[in-house]
Image: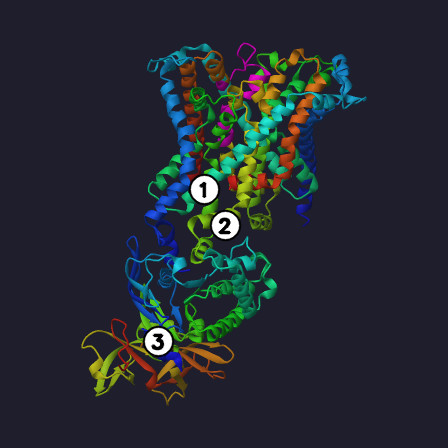
Amino acid sequence: MTLRAPSAGAGAGRNWALLALLALASLAMAAPLLWTLLLSLKSNGDLLRSTRSAFSPPYTLQNYSDILGHSAVFGWLLNSTIVSLAVTLGVLALSSLAGYGFARLRFPGRAVLFIVLLFGLAIPEQSVIIARHQMFSALNLHNTYRGLILPGLAAPFGVFLMTQYFRATPRELEEAATLDGASRFKIFWRILLPLSLPAQATLGIFTFLSTWNDYWWPLISATDSDMYTLTVGVASSQMNFAQTNGLGYLMAQAVFASAPILIVYVIFQRYIVAGVSRAAT
Amino acid sequence: MRRCGTTAGGGVGNLALRGVSKRFGSTVVLDDVSLEIGADEFLVVLGPSGCGKSTLLRAIAGLETIDAGEIEIDGARVDHLPPGKRGVAMVFQGYALYPHMTVRGNIAFGLKNIGTERAEIDRRIAAVARMLEIEHLLQRLPAELSGGQRQRVAIGRAIVKDPKVFMFDEPLSNLDAALRSRTRQEIANLHRRIRKAMIFVTHDQTEAMTLADRIVVMNQQRIEQVGTPLQVYREPATIFVATFIGSPAMNILPVTRAAGSGTLQWVRLADGTQIETTASEASLPGQGALRLGLRPESVRLCGLGDGQTKALVDFVEFLGDKTHVLLSLAGGDRLVALDGASCPVHAGESVGVLFDRAATHLFDAEGRNRGLTG
Amino acid sequence: MDSCEQTAAPSTRRTWAASKSEARSGLLFVAPYLIVFAVLLIYPLFSGIWLSLHKADLFGGSQFIGAQNYARLFRDPVFLTAVSNTLYFVLLTVPPLTLIGLGLALALNNRSRWSALLRGLFFSSSVLSVTIVTLIWRMVLIPDGGLIANLLTSIGRSPVAFLSDAHLALPAIAFTTIWWCIGLPMMLFLAALQQVPRDLYEAARLDNAGRWRMLASITLPSIRHTALVVVVIELILQFQLFGQAQIMTLGGPNNASLPMVLFIYQVGFQRWDIGYAAAASEILFGMILIAAMTQYFAARGRESR
């Protein structure tokens, strides 16, 4: 113990250095968020004189009530909600069905198809987006919900996740259900699907987040401002950023637009952590 | 009583396997298995890991297809039927309770699948719950139950379907020792009450000996012997059965043929000791090595001068009610003797050894017991 | 269960209807997804490669020109700038993301309330969309009244126009990106740290190992696999830099912050030179594959030695 005491002292010294580093990083992380919040609470007039006024009162909620009064934001919000929910539900349905098929049913070509899916995981969006855009033009799918939803259903990640999950559920349960006279679909519907709820939640939240935040595809597909998603809408409103005289309004819009996804994040936080853990190990 | 009596096939409500074989790729997992089980018989399939006993059970249940042979229940072929239509129920090793359903939901699932009416389902669940004393658990989820309670629910789920054959796949292996022996008695009681055919798979000889009307001993994908617990213990058909059943295991010593006196064959141990066996000279093969089987309880210790031979005590294991004495003979053979609690010998001593003639077994080169009559 | 049955089971187990009925329902279960997969991913992948061999425009006019698009790309100074910008950006982001992510995970891998709060803070930016992140950071970086400009003037320095300076634009975008993306590497490393068996540390303490010793000889070797995962994921992500550059600088000034994906977007969706854009996207695809594979096999090789 006497031997260890000095090194513990040095460790405590290093601790302070580490803590200082951590505090600095936290500050760098939080400062832009707080800055945005402060700006959103200032009147546009104050900010036009000097943004430095953001550090001192008076603060106002005027920008937020302006958004509530008349804003395209609600339309974008609705579009984002419809598209994200539809993609999420679609991915859950397709992935669960296919995951069960790949994990538990034997059919010709199963192994080869699964390897093709694994390769599919490696295809980045930009290598298909041009041809996909051409295809959707030909099918008149641009500026429609279908056009925004369909590409989100193609990613093989969900199938991969659900296959792994179903493979890990005990086979005995399905055998017991078989002996109980349940059909194959009934085993899927009444036994495996309820058991996979944690995985469904993880997959669902990741799909929802990535669809909600998707930028490139909605940018080129939804060119009518009526069909903008929130992400594209917020981008369009900051295009004339340098000339804007509604700085506070713009920042309030940023806060307002982040609110839904932050709420979703807080509610489903533990499924995000669970999903990341599964990916890491 | 019914121990041997009801084993013959042909009656209503029995199960028959004829020449059942199964392979996974090039690996044989069941090799020409034939078996008949009476309508109210408790059959235990006993064997070491990998012997094919679980596969046998799963083949009867329909969870595995078979490549050859027939399975009949109640005189009707079932080997082409799906598991749910065979009239069998199974209690799995891990119980396989549906974790998201209540106990009631678990028990009702099978009945709902065959379209049983609600009132009938309620009535049957009530009866089963009363019988197994799980009425207070019906609204709970499996995760909220103890191991023993889960076991009862798994049994309840089987009983409620009123199957022709009950199957148990090592159902006690997940329980602790005390609960295991209590559950064993409960299963025996259950069988006494509902009197249905039960097939119980285990690798534990105590379970087999205590529960079975008949024991099927399996090894290397084949049946070695079928018989009552007494038969497989007293008259093991093969050297495998002889050594697998009984603890400590039967001593097996290489012997050579000595004088034959009509019905009784004498053999000679490596140290020259001659021992009388129950095998007749005529029953023995002309050629090949012979091995002598001696249960530890039929090897007795005595004073140095009084024995058939003498041995050196290597080791003494005092177990309380009994003592294992590990001996080595002059010829290099080693064997175990089972002695009374107050065995006075110590490691390093020399003792006299007596062999109980009536309890000797003589095995031929193929491992078959040549001392059995009939 | 019997051991031989367990080992034989996964590959060859047959149930009562291993036959046609199982195959039929198996195909039924996977068919809906496979159709979507084939139509929306596989077809566009190959049709993109096919497109890259054509001179194609918005109006469907298309003419096979072989590898000419590719030849043109290698002579196009703007494209070559975009390639080097992309590589520079990857270099600016991937190592810091990995190292800072690891550092944060090590610092926050405990049960205290503060750590939980900070983990939430560092991950929170990851759930924001790129357009909100850029909006926030433009207001931080802008020389006229931005957060950094305010800080600089308050200590008597003059503001810096990060986004219109050819040398600072890409690093500024990189910094923004690190701020935005740091949550995922941190969480991946945290998850991996949770998996390191506690008794290893206890054994090391009995062997008088100090804090750095334990870090070097237990923690880091145990999370090597995760480090590889993080690097590969971030490589793939950061090669595809698009939104930040498109919104914050439009690739400027003078293409100093033009990444490959923005080049593809401008060529394909603003100049409608679709075949040319497709060719550029195939080259990017190839670069990502090579980078990820190199990392993967390099790590493999090191592990096997």
Tell which residue pokes out farthest to the bottom in this image. Answer: B306
Under mark 3, the amino acid is Thr
Q: Name the residue under label 2.
A: A190
Give the residue displayed 55% in from the left and 44% down from the top. A198
* Closer mark to the observer between disc 3 and disc 2: 2
Q: Mark 3 points at which residue?
A: B7
Among the 4 quarters of the image, the one containing residue B198: bottom left
Among the 4 quarters of the image, the one containing residue B273: bottom left
Q: Do the residues labelled 1 and 2 touch (CB within 8 Å)?
A: no
Q: List x then y, in percent, for residue B233.
A: 37, 78
Q: Is residue C251 magenta?
A: yes
Mark 1 Cα-neighbour bin, 10 Å: few <14, some 14–19, many ≥20: many
Under mark 1, the amino acid is Leu
- The chain holding disc 1 is A
Give the residue displayed 44% in from the left and 62% down from the top. B90
- The chain holding disc 2 is A
Q: Name the residue under label 1.
A: A97
Mark 2 Cα-neighbour bin, 10 Å: few <14, some 14–19, many ≥20: some
In terms of sequence position, does the residue under pointer 1 or pointer 2 come before the other? 1
Q: Is residue B199 visible?
A: yes
Q: Does the magenta stretch include residue A119?
A: no
Whether labels 3 and 2 share one chain: no
In this rendering, the answer to whether A136 lies above or below B7 is above
User: In what element is the residue under mark 3?
Assistant: loop
User: How far apart are labels 3 and 2 at the CA level?
Assistant: 40 Å
User: In what element is the residue under mark 1?
Assistant: helix
Among the 4 quarters of the image, the one containing residue B3: bottom left
Range of magenta residues: C232-261
